[in-house]
Image (cartoon, rainbow, N blue to C red):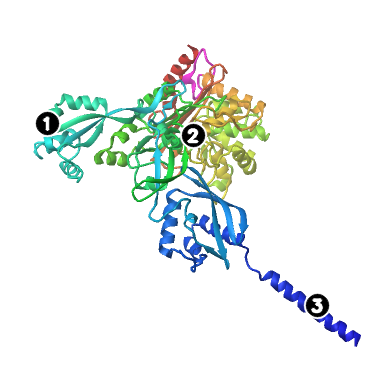
């Protein structure tokens, strides 16, 4: 009997435990959890689901349409981000909380109380916004800095600034009807239809000035000399525009600004842009848009239907005025390089190998960034886009077959891996193949020096020597050092540069490919900025500074990629390539400055027997004196039958001389 009682008591205890556990786990959400969940939905902009959490039985609950529209209007208009709430207290199912909302004009913070019943929110208007009343709306006031920051060269010379332009326009009431439209259109390089369209806008009154075209001072003077002001109704007024004093010389670096379009306004919503704003396109103007423009100040207010302020929600003062951007560029060197190559398809990079500062970055042919600011006619725009020489393309961003410019790099890898003995004579060969498995394919060279050692192979640019050396180095060593040199990786630079490469993706590696890579053919493609940077290792004891174009960015990019002994050997060979009377770079030899350098001619053709292909000409030259550190790399397209890389050597003389004379003064 006692055992039976114990058994019944045991069952009762279990039942009680189960009921207790069920009760604990079936209590549902706490009021704090409900409020927190509501604001988590706000962060996700899930307004419909928020509405589903409302208790419809309280005195005032808006319709779902009204609720969703108001939340969307308020929170998306102010660009609400990082919404956080802090629960402060709970009394009688009323939660007091503090809310933080980051907006385009600073942070909105306020307290509110909300009731919770049966896991439902009891709506009050302050849930939408502090001070909210029916019919109120958000008013955002922004203040844009008046002037855009300047872009300067390293010596303070202005490359871009806000300046003066001239708006040529028409006053409708003073025109002789449309009788003079033909002559006006001719002066302004437009058409009658464009004039008619602009003059038919609904806002135009008889005394309204309707701008037709913005022009430079030189163009304005030319138009005045042609007596454009003698036509009834034509007027010229002064306007503020962005000006580029060096125009084509630096346009690829500097870029230009244009009026914002609908896409810009959508992308940069709530950043202070409006229909009259300008925004950077290309180059430094685009890359440093925020600093050049400055950070907009502003405030957000709650106003009634008559725009009377109910409450100021937040106010952000200007934290950053427009800033000048000072480049590492020496505009005089930039100008001299541009002058030499303006009629070529070329890219030139000059840098200080001891700091990585880019002293010049030239792409030719070029375009006028002032034309973009003033407004391009359809004919001019089409001419630029359809030009076979592609003046809009920044050639220094591209990659090219490096040809013999790669030989010193192959040599350095061979010395590091001890697969090249610099003093060993490999035996001069004008034509060579590994074995008969190559069929009709041979590596040929124009210069097979004797003795056939490393120094002579660089001095006279022997293809066969470096093809044989590459096979001795082997794929694994070669590719390992290409990776160490960051070939194939994104180049850290303020302006986007295409990645260099040493092999195509999924390419099968053959001995022939490795041999060709040794003298810069195969599938190697090099960006000129990166090639110049790698050469700087030969005067920096094996380390490479990160290339940069904005001042204050000096830092090591690749440390000790080559040993001091290796770089000393390569540098001596590069000095000889210029000092030797038969060296490929001797045309630039100087008596008073020790120069080191290497030419490169890359063949662009479909096969070894192809005679219709073209050639790229490369030349890299650098000083070895730390008092005048400079390294210049130029690649020129279509140099076949124009002297090959010798063309580039000749055209590098004057810019180098001008720079060295300037530095020594």
Q: Is residue 591 magenta?
A: yes
Per the rendered image, the range of residues in magenta is 581-594
| Foreground disc of the pair 2, 1 | 2
* Residue 504 drawn above or below residue 534: below
| Foreground disc of the pair 3, 1 | 3
Q: Which residue is the extreme one toward the right? A: 2
**SS label for mark 1:** loop
In terms of depth relative to the viewer, which is nearer, 577 or 2?
2
**SS label for mark 3:** helix
Residue 231 has which mark?
1
| C-alpha distance separating marks 3 and 1 | 107 Å
Q: In the image, is 381 to the left or to the right of 270?
A: left
The mark that comes first in sequence, 3 or 2, is 3
**SS label for mark 2:** loop
* Residue 221 drawn above or below residue 613: above
Q: Pointer 3: what residue?
A: 13
Q: Would you identify the image quadrant in which residue 276 lies?
A: top left
């Amino acid at each position: 009997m006692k055992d039976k009682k114990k058994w019944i008591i045991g069952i009762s205890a279990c039942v009680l435990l189960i009921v207790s556990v069920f009760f604990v786990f079936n209590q549902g959400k706490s009021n704090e959890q409900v409020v927190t969940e509501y604001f988590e939905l706000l962060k996700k902009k899930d307004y419909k689901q928020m509405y589903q959490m409302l208790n419809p039985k309280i005195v005032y609950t808006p319709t779902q349409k009204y609720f969703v529209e108001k939340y969307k209007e308020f929170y998306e208009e102010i660009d609400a981000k990082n919404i956080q709430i802090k629960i402060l207290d709970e009394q009688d199912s009323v939660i007091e909380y503090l809310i933080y909302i980051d907006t385009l004009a600073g942070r909105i913070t306020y307290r509110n109380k909300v009731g919770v019943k049966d896991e439902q929110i009891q709506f009050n208007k302050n849930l939408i916004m502090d001070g909210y009343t029916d019919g109120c709306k958000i008013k955002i006031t922004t203040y844009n800095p008046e002037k855009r920051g300047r872009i300067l060269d390293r010596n303070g010379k202005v490359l871009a600034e806000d300046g003066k332009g001239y708006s040529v326009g028409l006053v409708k009431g003073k025109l002789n009807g449309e009788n003079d439209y033909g002559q006006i259109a001719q002066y302004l390089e437009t058409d009658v239809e464009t004039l008619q369209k602009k003059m038919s806008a609904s806002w135009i009154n008889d005394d309204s000035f309707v701008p037709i075209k913005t022009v430079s001072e030189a163009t304005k003077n030319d138009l005045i000399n042609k007596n454009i002001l003698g036509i009834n109704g034509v007027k010229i007024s002064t306007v503020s525009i962005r000006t580029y004093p060096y125009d084509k010389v630096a346009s690829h670096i500097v870029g230009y600004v244009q009026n914002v379009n609908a896409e810009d306004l959508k992308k940069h919503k709530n950043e202070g842009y409006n229909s009259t704003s300008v925004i950077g396109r290309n180059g430094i103007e685009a890359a440093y848009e925020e600093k050049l423009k400055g950070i907009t100040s502003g405030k957000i207010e709650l106003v009634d239907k008559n725009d009377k302020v109910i409450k100021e929600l937040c106010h952000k003062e200007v934290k950053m005025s427009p800033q000048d951007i000072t480049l590492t560029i020496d505009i005089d060197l930039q100008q001299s390089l541009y002058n030499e190559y303006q009629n070529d398809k070329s890219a030139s990079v000059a840098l200080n190998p001891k700091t990585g500062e880019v002293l010049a970055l030239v792409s030719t042919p070029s375009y006028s960034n002032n034309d973009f600011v003033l407004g391009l006619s359809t004919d001019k725009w089409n001419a630029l886009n359809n030009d076979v020489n592609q003046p809009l393309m920044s050639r220094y961003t591209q990659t090219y077959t490096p040809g013999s410019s790669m030989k010193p790099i192959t040599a350095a890898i061979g010395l590091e891996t001890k697969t090249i003995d610099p003093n060993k004579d490999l035996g001069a060969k004008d034509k060579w193949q590994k074995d008969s498995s190559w069929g009709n394919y041979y590596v040929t060279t124009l210069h097979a020096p004797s003795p056939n050692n490393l120094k002579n192979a660089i001095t006279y640019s022997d293809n066969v020597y470096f093809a044989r050396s590459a096979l001795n180095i082997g794929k694994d060593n070669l590719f390992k050092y290409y990776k160490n040199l960051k070939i194939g990786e994104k180049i850290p630079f303020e302006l986007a540069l295409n990645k260099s490469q040493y092999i195509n993706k999924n390419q099968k590696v053959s001995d022939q490919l490795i041999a060709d890579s040794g003298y810069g053919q195969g599938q190697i493609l090099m960006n000129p900025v990166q090639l110049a940077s790698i050469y700087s290792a030969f005067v920096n004891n094996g380390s490479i500074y990160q290339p940069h174009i904005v001042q204050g960015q000096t830092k090591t990019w690749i440390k000790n990629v080559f040993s001091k002994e290796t770089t000393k050997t390569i540098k001596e060979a590069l000095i000889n390539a210029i000092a030797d009377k038969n060296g490929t770079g001797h045309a630039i030899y100087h008596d008073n400055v020790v120069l080191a350098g290497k030419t490169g001619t890359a063949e662009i053709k479909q096969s070894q027997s192809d005679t219709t292909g073209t050639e790229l000409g490369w030349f890299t030259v650098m000083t070895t004196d730390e008092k005048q550190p400079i390294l210049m790399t130029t690649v020129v397209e279509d140099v076949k039958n124009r002297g090959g890389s010798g063309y580039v050597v000749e055209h590098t003389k004057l810019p180098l001389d001008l720079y060295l004379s300037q530095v020594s003064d």
